[in-house]
Amino acid sequence: MNFTRKAFFAFVLSTAFFPESVFATINSGWTKIRYIYPTGTGMLFVTEYKNTELSTCDGGSRFLLNINHPDYPTQVSALIAAFIAQKDVNLFIVEQPPACHALVDRFMVGR
């Protein structure tokens, strides 16, 4: 097997285990969480950041941590802690067609 084929197969195998969102996210920049509320699909929250091309509810500021994300327990704990401590968050939002809430793949909490 030549190098190009080996590299191709290595790329395919390495990307097969990552969610698509790892490759297609939009960064919000640092923002505040205005409120949070749990639902059957995960933790919904509204931020000062708005993007009406991804989120069509609450003026483009509604986002979701999906309950099926493998890191959901850690993510939701960190989000609640950031909200209580009034810390800024930097969201990595999945690039997808507009929906009522945009899906957040991961985020950072500022100090």
Image: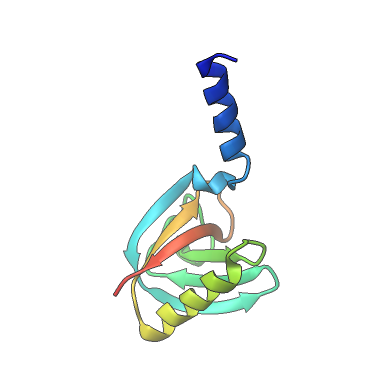
Q: Quadrant of residue 10?
A: top right
Q: Quadrant of residue 88?
A: bottom left
Give 15 or 1, whichever is nearer the viewer. 1
In percent of width and height, residue 94 lies at 52, 51
Q: Residue at x 37, y 84 (%)?
A: 85
| Direction right: furthest residue | 40
Left or right: 30, with 8 as reference point: left
Give 67 or 9, whichever is nearer the viewer. 9
Q: Residue at x 48, y 55 (%)?
A: 93
| Direction top: furthest residue | 2
Q: Residue at x 49, y 80 (%)?
A: 80
Left or right: 23, with 29 as reference point: right
In percent of width and height, residue 8 lies at 56, 24
Task: For the N terminus, give its image quadrant.
Answer: top right
Q: Residue at x 62, y 62 (%)?
A: 70
Question: For the image shown, how many numbered marks are present on the structure?
Answer: 0
Q: Is residue 86 above or below residue 13?
A: below
Q: Tell me if I can see residue 97 in this picture.
A: no
